[in-house]
Each structure stands twice: as C-alpha cells, then as structure tokens.
Amino acid sequence: MPYPISEDTLLLLKHLKCGRKTLEMGTGNGIIAIECAKSGSKVVAVDIDPEAIEELKLKSKKEGLRIEARVSNLFQNVSGRFDVIIFNPPYLPGNPKELEDLQWAGGGKFGDEIIMRFLSQAKDYLSPEGEIYIILSSFNRLGEIKKMPYRFKLIAKEKFAFHEIYLYQLKPIHKT
C-alpha cells in the first residue's frame, strides 16, 4: 500500500518547486510527481514498492500525464541528470522488516541511514545548477547530515507532539 498523503507530503506540496526535469525519489502515493507533471515538468518517479509504481502509472494515465515511473532502490534504476530531486524519505528510527515499513522507518537508531545513502549519491544525478528538496526529522542526526557536501537552506518546518519535520533545499558544494 503506497504511502498516504500526510503532513510531510503536504509540507512539500505547499513549498513545491519542480524543475524542467524532476526526479521524485520514493514517490509513494505519487502526488508530488503528479503535481510536477501538471506544472509542465518532465518527471521521473521511482519507488522501491512495485505497487506504488503501478498505482502511479494508472493515476498518470487517467489524468493524461506523462510520468516515467519505475521500481528502483534509491538510484539503482535511475540515469541522467535532473534540475530538481525531491525526496520525502523514510526518516523515523527503526529497522524495517517489511517493504511497507520502509515508508516510515529509515533504518537504524536515528532513522537516517537511507538519507545518508541518498545524499552520498544524489549529487551525481543533479544538473550543474540542480537542487534537492528533502524532508528531515528532529530524530535524524542533523549535524552529521549537514556534513555532507551540500549547502542546506531551511525552507519550512512543522512541529508535532513527538518530533519536528523540516523541509530543506540542498545545493551541492562544488570543489574547485
């Protein structure tokens, strides 16, 4: 069952900026990919869950949108460069046992193992002026994440009973 539309999805939708060529990593319910396609972006949407990809293909066909949707574990089945990469990752702590658990739990004590793997690869898929929009949580090791070779700009945050979520814009730091 694909990831439901939740507060983190709504936060992304509120501040959404799609590029000419956009990659949505971990598309889940597909709403972000659909909104980017409606805005004229050429969209590639990937998810580790085959069911989520099939549902997105059906939704995009029904709405007459061209979205290239495929199953991929992070960048496994992704090629090319993108102006914008959007990722609402599994950011809660835990060790997923089922595919469905990956919608929430990002692995490990701080829920950021998938985030760290994503960020270590993402810069290789960005166009020269490309940017990433990513949701992070107060559970994550933000200090460690911010050591990655990106400039981090906080776009929005939302507080909940047991944690906060943050929407960041990231741009790679190019070494000269």
Image (cartoon, helix red, strand yellow):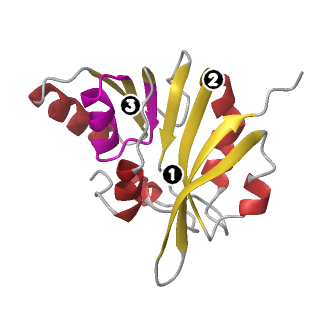
Query: Is disc 1 placed on a helix, strand or loop?
Result: loop
Q: Residue at x 66, y 54 (%)?
A: 113
Asked whether the beta carbons under mark 2 and mark 1 sit within 8 Å of each other, the answer is: no
In this figure, which residue is indicated by the disc labeled 1? Answer: 89
Q: Is residue 74 left or right of residue 110?
A: left
Asked whether the beta carbons under mark 2 and mark 3 sit within 8 Å of each other, the answer is: no
Q: CA distance from mark 2 to mark 3?
A: 20 Å
The correct choice, above or below, for 122 with respect to 106 in the image is above
The mark that comes first in sequence, 2 or 1, is 1
Q: Residue at x 54, y 77 (%)?
A: 163
What's the amino acid at mark 2? Glu
Report the residue that reaches farthest toward the right: 176
Residue 143 appears at what percent x and percent y? 78, 61
In this figure, which residue is indicated by the disc labeled 2? Answer: 129
In this figure, which residue is indicated by the disc labeled 3? Answer: 45
Residue 63 appears at what percent x and percent y? 12, 30
Query: Would you call the spot at circle 3 few (<14 residues within 10 Å), some (14-19), or many (20 or more)?
Result: many
The correct choice, above or below, for 66 with respect to 104 in the image is above
What's the amino acid at mark 1? Pro
The correct choice, above or below, for 13 with respect to 92 in the image is above
The mark that comes first in sequence, 2 or 3, is 3
Q: Which residues are magenta?
A: 22-42
Q: Is residue 58 left or right of residue 73?
A: left
